[in-house]
Image (tube, rainbow, N blue to C red):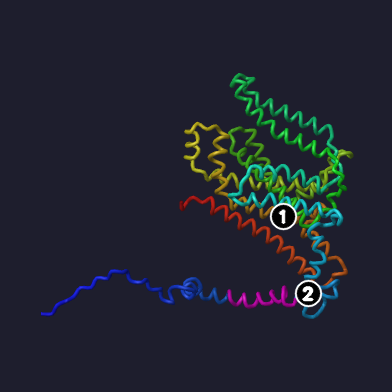
Amino acid sequence: MASSVAYVRTEPAATLPPPIRVGGVVGWIRENLFSGLGNTVLTLLALYVIWVTVPPIIEFLFVDAVWEGSDREACVGPNVGACWAFVEARFPQYIYGRYPIEERWRVDIVFALLAIGLIPMAIPRAPFKRANAVFLLVVLPVVSLILLNGGDFDVWLSWWIMLAVGLAIAEAIVFLPALLGAVPFSDRLRPALVAMVPFAVLAAVFVVLSIDFGLMEVETALWGGLLVTLVVALCGIAASLPIGILLALGRRSDLPLVRLFSVIFIEFWRGVPLITILFMSSVMLPLFLPDDVSFDKLLRALIGVAMFASAYMAEVVRGGLQAMPKGQYEGADALGLGHWQKMQLIILPQALKHVIPGIVNTFIGLFKDTSLILIVGLFDLLGMVKLSLVDPKWASPVTPATGYIFAGFVFWLFCFGMSRYSIFIERRLDRSGR
């Protein structure tokens, strides 16, 4: 009688690698590029387009490019590519515009301070966030204004009078419930102190601006290049987000006057093209002002851009507020939170998290729209590129293309950086998989 011996494996068998046609690079290609007839046709068509377009572009930008030269003769020829010597020669103008050469160190300091403030602010776990925010939103604008503009700022008496009147109105609004007997005066002391903070900051700014630092005055008409692009974009970004949040809350307010004002503001600024706003601020506004009253062209452009971007930002934030479930409001009410506490602690953080892509998209559009300030006589990066193309010293068939490629690359670099940072913030704030 035959006997059988049982065999029991004491160690698990080694995992076999997937077939070469299923895993690895070949498997990925088969699954994503050649999974069917339609996908195969699209892949082959895309490869053909890449083969036709990419090599000539690389050849124009790098292989046949001119890297050294002092005039147009270096960039004239039958097979000449991009004239990077022209960009190198005009690079200071693309960064500083017509800012005086001997005073450009002031612009460099502003750029350095901006980097010092932005880099720690962009790092999530960097310490001293509040101090850094105060530096970016209060200290840096004042220091930048003093360094870039220079000269002696005339702080008029009317400024102090308006500041005092504004403080009096704010305090009256704060103490109005106490005067009506609705709440005791002691409950309004803390809000009164909070209301005094912005006015105290403005008073400190006026005092600093009244000091003569001995810097030569540089008119904003001489500013240009990347300097103006960043000034307009950063001021618009810094102003549009808080104003947009207030407008979005105002549009959803139960107070009829507040809601009506917010709706009119948003619909007016959103319904008018930005180029029309800049044209009106440059040409029409001075006609309605007294002869002895004038506003700087850059200031007019900053106000127009900020108001225009705020209207779009308000609709983005309103979309986030509408996406909030009703249970979040009910939960905040159950905790006994007031309206502003509910918005600050519960609603707004979640609403803003939901619309991060829309917010960054508005910022990117604002950054690219800075090129429209050329209509008010200010030359941003693209404006300086256009201005440099009329120089007969560098006139050649490839010079315009090279200048526009450089400007496009700089704009793309900033926009791509904002896009990638927004994706990083989205992933960091995502709680769906935790």
For the point 84% across and 55% down, the residue is: 99
Percent from the top left, x then y, of residue 196?
A: 69, 31
Whole-number angstrom distance, CA of label 1 to CA of label 2: 31 Å
Is 377 located above or below residue 412 in the figure? above
229 and 330: which one is in front? 229
Quarter location, residue 63 = bottom right
Magenta residues, dominant SS class: helix
Position of the N terminus by quadrant:
bottom left
Residue on which the image places disc 2: 66
271 and 81: which one is in front? 81
Disc 1 element = helix
Mark number displayed over residue 164: none
Is 394 located above or below residue 211 in the figure? below
Mark number displayed over residue 369: 1
Q: Residue furthest front?
A: 10
Percent from the top left, x then y, of residue 184?
A: 60, 20
Quarter location, residue 341 = top right
Quarter location, residue 66 = bottom right
What residue type is disc 1 on? Asp
What residue type is disc 2 on? Val
Q: Residue furthest left?
A: 1
- Taking the image as shown, residue 245 lies to the left or right of residue 93, namely left
Percent from the top left, x then y, of residue 429?
A: 53, 50
Range drawn in magenta: 46-64
Mark 2: few/some/many CA within 10 Å (<14, 14-19, 20+) = some
